[in-house]
Image (cartoon, rainbow, N blue to C red):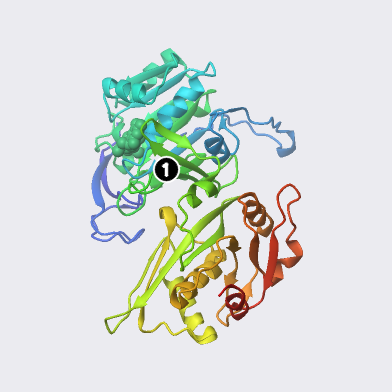
Amino acid sequence: MGKTKTKFICQECGYESPKWMGKCPGCSNWNTFVEEIEKRDTKKNTRGISSTRLMKLKDIAVEEEKRISTTYSELDRVLGGGIVNSSLVLVGGDPGIGKSTLLMQTADRVAKQDQKVLYVTGEESARQIKIRAERLGMESNNIYILAETNVEHIINSLEKLNPNLLILDSIQTIYNPEITSAPGSVSQVKEVTATIMRITKSSDMSTFIVGHVTKQGSIAGPRVLEHMVDTVLYFEGDTQHSYRILRAVKNRYGSTNEVGVFQMNDAGLEEIINPSSFFLESRTENSYGSVIAASMEGTRPLLIEIQALISHSSFGVPRRVTTGVDNSRAAMLMAVLEKKAGIQLQNSDAYINVIGGMQVKETAVDLPILCAIASSFKEINIDQNTIIMGEVGLSGEVRGIKDIDKRIKEAQKMGFKRAVVPFSNTKNVKNDKDSEEIEILNVKTIEEVLDILL
Ligand code: TYD
Ligand code: MG
């Protein structure tokens, strides 16, 4: 037996130090160091790859990886085409966002395809799970529930059952009794994940691990897991709105920045196959300050409504409030409007909002934001059948954006009649043959755009 040593570990980022520190040099958070006793680990191979055979690169045979469909097209796409056999997926998100609901429903869908699913819960009792399952209308008899937090007991059940899919809800509640630190601490979370990873990689079973995110925005502990797992998905949304977005931030088996859109209602989560129509559903008719923008979420175009309200400021320093778009970007666009279009905003409060609580980070929404501000300022409506896209430069020029084709196609599908498109993108714009013709307006500067629209 080796000596037991203690060390201090940052619970945010996993930074290790022999002595306590107030501020973590790794992630700059305060008061995150916790003393943990470390057992000398004799198991060297914690990365889960067990074969140590020396091979020539060109002799390694690759087969197409086997996948199980979840039958949710939104989830399958984010995973890169279904759940890959022997893969480890981390699903992170705020508490209460719907992770357990999503995975319960996925368990049901997978189990219906004659696959054995084990759902391990460390957060709820078996009875609570049953109540939830009834609410979700789950009927498969291939799902097994284990309310357990000791990883050794979980492994015993795994050996007995041999499931095709394992769901661990959540990593913060499961512990290894050989490690003295508390469940949810960095050492526990790492150790449990390494154990589960070894089992997952050496069998045909795939595993989903649920991880809660802390206030600071990183998954407590699980941030240190991101490099161990194959796929990291984040489930986002706010509790004010019913829609939820599933985002891939890492995927060894597919593209990242894919998103899936879901809606939470009484009977659980429902996928939204056509998010544009969902976000445009309650579109305000004929009111100034409202513009429809075409933004891209991953590889998929998404049409969203952007609203601006410009009102006279009663204080010396005008307010600039944005939700869903970057504050400094909006300030920049207002400066461009003042300088290049002569719209004086220094005595006005400005409120900018993306409807539905969406977050857009793309620069392609510059021009729509700018148009919404101008429209509200001048109190002139922008035609409801016009879609606007383009990046705006500091000298008021409209710059090209990527994926113009997909955005135009989506706009056509949604019945838009006109599209304002950066001039430099003109070459790439093609009208979609299957939908009604859309009129393309090529623009070079914001003056041109405002002339056309207002
Ligand atoms: P849950 O999946 O428990 O969240 P997480 O596992 O991420 O912590 O979902 C919690 C919320 O979802 C809860 O506040 C209630 C809501 N909910 C519904 O609106 N409809 C449903 O059918 C279910 C099961 C939950
Ligand atoms: Mg939960």
The residue drawn where x is 46% and y is 68% is 288
* Callout count: 1
Q: Within the image, what quadrant is residue 151 found in?
A: top left
The residue drawn where x is 60% and y is 78% is 451
Q: Is residue 385 depicted above or below 1 in this figure? A: below
Specify whether residue 326 is in view: no
Sort mark 1 into few (<14), some (14-19) or many (20+) by Cα contacts within 10 Å: many
Q: In which quarter of the image is the C terminus?
A: bottom right
Q: Is residue 49 depicted above or below 240 in this figure? A: above
Disc 1 target residue: 225
* Farthest-out residue, front: 286
SS at mark 1 in the image: helix
Rendering coords of residue 333 (x, y %)? 49, 76
Q: In this view, does 213 lie to the left or right of 262?
A: left
The answer to which of 234 and 407 lies nearer the viewer is 407
Q: Which amino acid does label 1 sit on?
A: Leu
The answer to which of 182 and 38 lies nearer the viewer is 182
Rendering coords of residue 4 (x, y %)? 26, 38
The residue drawn where x is 26% and y is 82% is 315
The answer to which of 313 and 125 lies nearer the viewer is 313
Q: Within the image, what quadrant is residue 21 found in?
A: bottom left
Q: Is residue 173 left or right of residue 415?
A: left
Specify whether residue 374 is in view: yes
Q: Quadrant of the N terminus?
A: top left
